[in-house]
Amino acid sequence: MEKLAFVPAQIRAGRALVGCSQDELALEAGISLTSLREIEGQRRPPDTAAADKIRRALDNRGVAFVPSDKGGGPGVRLIDNRPHIIRPPTTMTFWEGMPFTVEWEGKEVTVFVSREVIDDLGRHTGHPPDSEYLRTFGEFRGSILDGVKAAIDDPANYDDRGRLHVRHKDIAEFNQHLRPTRFRA
């Protein structure tokens, strides 16, 4: 498999596209802030393991790296066919789960991801603080948004107030390598 090349300017542009600071990206990528700054500042080549982690973290936030071609240079854009967050989650409710708002096909949709889904993705036990749930959301953001896309067209996933509920059946990880500790559809 051929490794896709990218340039440091794409990292800076990707951060700007999704409103992500260097501190936030370094944390999400699991690298040091110094490493990120050196790669963005072209003092370290973008072909290191740290650069791969940066690219995965930006992909998780919905950034697609566009390669150069005969018509123009490299760039970034939002991932096509994935809902985009308007209002990110800030809390975990006890009964309904984690609320946030997305844009999908020009419409605003209020989404609730069940507590059980977030617990199983993060392998949580007991009652962790909201900050732990929010960390798990950030780590699995791309998968959760893909789950929103999977759930959004099924009227059975909406409650009587028009809010979308995302459950295990909508998240690809539960159909692949993760085994939920409690499967509740």
Image (tube, grey):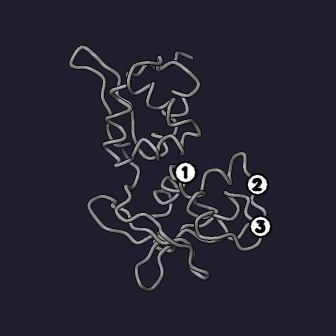
Three-letter code, disc 2: Arg
Say which mark, if any, is on residue 43.
none
Question: Quick one: 38 or 128, which is closer to the camera?
Answer: 38
Precedes in sequence: disc 3 or disc 1: 3
Q: Give the residue number, with chain letter if any, for mark 1.
A: 143
Say which mark, if any, is on residue 125.
3
- Rendered position, 124 above or below 69: below
Three-letter code, disc 3: Thr
Say which mark, if any, is on residue 179.
2
Judge left or right: residue 70 versus residue 138: left
Whole-number angstrom distance, CA of label 3 to CA of label 1: 21 Å
Q: Are marks 3 and 1 in contact (CB under 8 Å)?
A: no
Please tell me whether mark 2 sits on a helix, a strand or a loop.
loop
Whole-number angstrom distance, CA of label 1 to CA of label 2: 15 Å
Residue ID at (47%, 42%) = 25
Residue 56 in the image: state x and y as whole percent.
52, 36
Q: Do the residues labelled 2 and 3 touch (CB within 8 Å)?
A: no
